[in-house]
Image: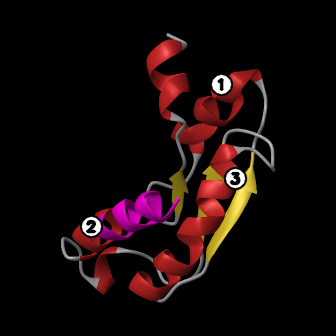
Amino acid sequence: MKLKSAILAMTLAAFAGTATAEDFPKGSVDYIIPFGPGGESDITARFQQPFFEKLFGEQMVVNYQPGGGGAVGWSQLNNMAGDGSVIMGINLPHIIIKP
């Protein structure tokens, strides 16, 4: 788990350097998990919260949209704000194996 957290922190730090504060809206960021609470996606998101908040100075709010093996949440992504105030977690095995 520490390795996952370290990789995530480095990834977030890389993205932090590519944008300025004016590029994104102020306020909390919704992190959409296309699965229910308590699974690996939820656990990973909860580990990401403190790193995100430290790097960006904004609160990351985890929201769940379970159903259809992630399809419900993913199908709604295009209708969500595209301004950086909404991000979505992925589950790599679902992306690679399910299709």
Residue position marked by numbered label 1 in the rendering: 71
First to last magenta residue range: 1-10
The mark nearer the N terminus, 2 or 1, is 2
Residue position marked by numbered label 2 in the rendering: 15
User: What percent of the width, then of the height, locates residue 73?
Assistant: 66, 36
Kindly identify which numbered label has been placed on residue 90.
none
Q: Main secondary structure of the magenta part?
A: helix
Residue 58 shown in magenta? no
Q: Is residue 9 left or right of residue 98?
A: left
User: What percent of the width, then of the height, locates residue 32?
Assistant: 63, 52
Determine which quarter of the picture holds residue 22.
bottom left
Residue position marked by numbered label 3 in the rendering: 42
x 28%, y 75%: residue: 16
x 50%, y 14%: residue: 97
Q: Residues within 10 Å of mark 2 (few under 14, many from 20)?
A: few
Determine which quarter of the picture holds residue 29.
bottom right
User: What is the residue that sits farthest to the top in this orientation?
Assistant: 99
